[in-house]
Image (spheres, helix red, strand yellow):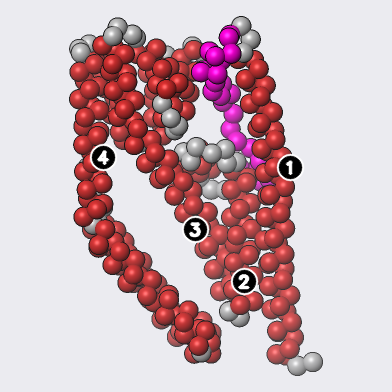
Amino acid sequence: MNLAAITSDLGLLTATVFLGMGVLLLMLLYATAGKDATRARNLNRRVSALRQRGQNPAAAAARATSIKKVEARSDIPGLEELARKFVPKRAILTERLARTGKSIALGTFALVCISTGAMVAGLLLVLFKFSLAICILGGIAVGIGLPHLVVGRMIAKRTRDFLAVFPEAIELIVRGIKSGLPVTEEIAIVGREMVDPVGHEFRRISDALRFGQNLDEALWDAARRLNIPDFNFFVISLSVQRETGGNLAETLENLAEILRRRRQMKLKIRAISSEARASGYIIGSLPFAVGCILFLIAPSYVTMLFTDPRGLAIVGAGLTLQAIGGLVMAKMVRFEI
């Protein structure tokens, strides 16, 4: 057996190992996800049963929310401990996962990153016949970048949903204050009446108040959890009014109007810059689209870029210039309001 055949067999074996690792990890994640969901349903059912003691069913249903404050943990033995030990900047990553509004454990997120990287490395080795070093580097890049991109999308969507109805929640508080109700009672009403994620966050604030936490601490905990400037304005307005006094209803009414106009300005800027963003997407995707077409037509012509050192230098320079151009265009259409 010649050297080329041996190298081909080793490459196929390595690709099979990578693909098998990715599939195995995804199957393990899927199996534990169902167990976590069942456990969460049982826990929520027990919490609802405890809440209904001494309350009528209508009041219990109106006030139903989570009173437990536990950090999401993976159900795979030892996985959470390994993730907490080896994942860098664990506290920042945990806060980022919590901002998605989903119960994503740190160990589960690490498992998704590892399985995604292993599958990508295997696919690159099988389909494109790249060298093992390039496949490993590509798997690491995609395994780390793609889950973080998905988490960022989830956070952005939850932030948009929050800001869409947050001014209405402030106006609901204003109407309650004008009718003589205290702020704490209005926060509970917002938690019952408004849709999630606004209702969910205000229910958490109301639960914290019922368990003895003062208003300022509960609001600032929510502000750190959300990390949304609009909500920070709301918290600062309440804190300043509690210290200095004044017409809180008028202050919050003006704040709601400012936040609504701020959101309208953001939407207007997005609409005006839509043509430039579309052009950027098209121009940025052209090199990759042309590369894929050339690979389908003449694979040997494209693979030289990844097998020859000069080709690797050209690819690296091109990706660097693409990244710089994308960052410049993103900066041009992004404004702080």
Nearer to us: label 4 or label 2: 4
Q: Earlier in the sequence, mark 2 or mark 3?
A: 2
State the residue position of label 1.
Answer: 77
Dot 3 surroundings within 10 Å: few (below 14), some, or many (20 or more)?
A: some
Which residue matches tag 3? 145
- Amino acid type assigned to the residue bearing label 3 in the image: Gly
Element marked by disc 2 = helix
Q: Return the mark for residue 101.
A: none
Amino acid on which disc 2 is placed = Leu
* Side of 99 relative to 327 (left or right): right
C-alpha span from label 3 to label 1: 26 Å
Looking at the rendering, the stretch of residues picked out in magenta corresponds to: 55-84
Residue situated in front as seen by the camera: 101 or 13 = 101
Query: Do residues under tags 4 and 2 come within 8 Å of each other at their CB atoms?
Result: no
Q: Which residue is disc 4 drawn over?
A: 263
Question: Which image quadrant is residue 254 in?
Answer: top left
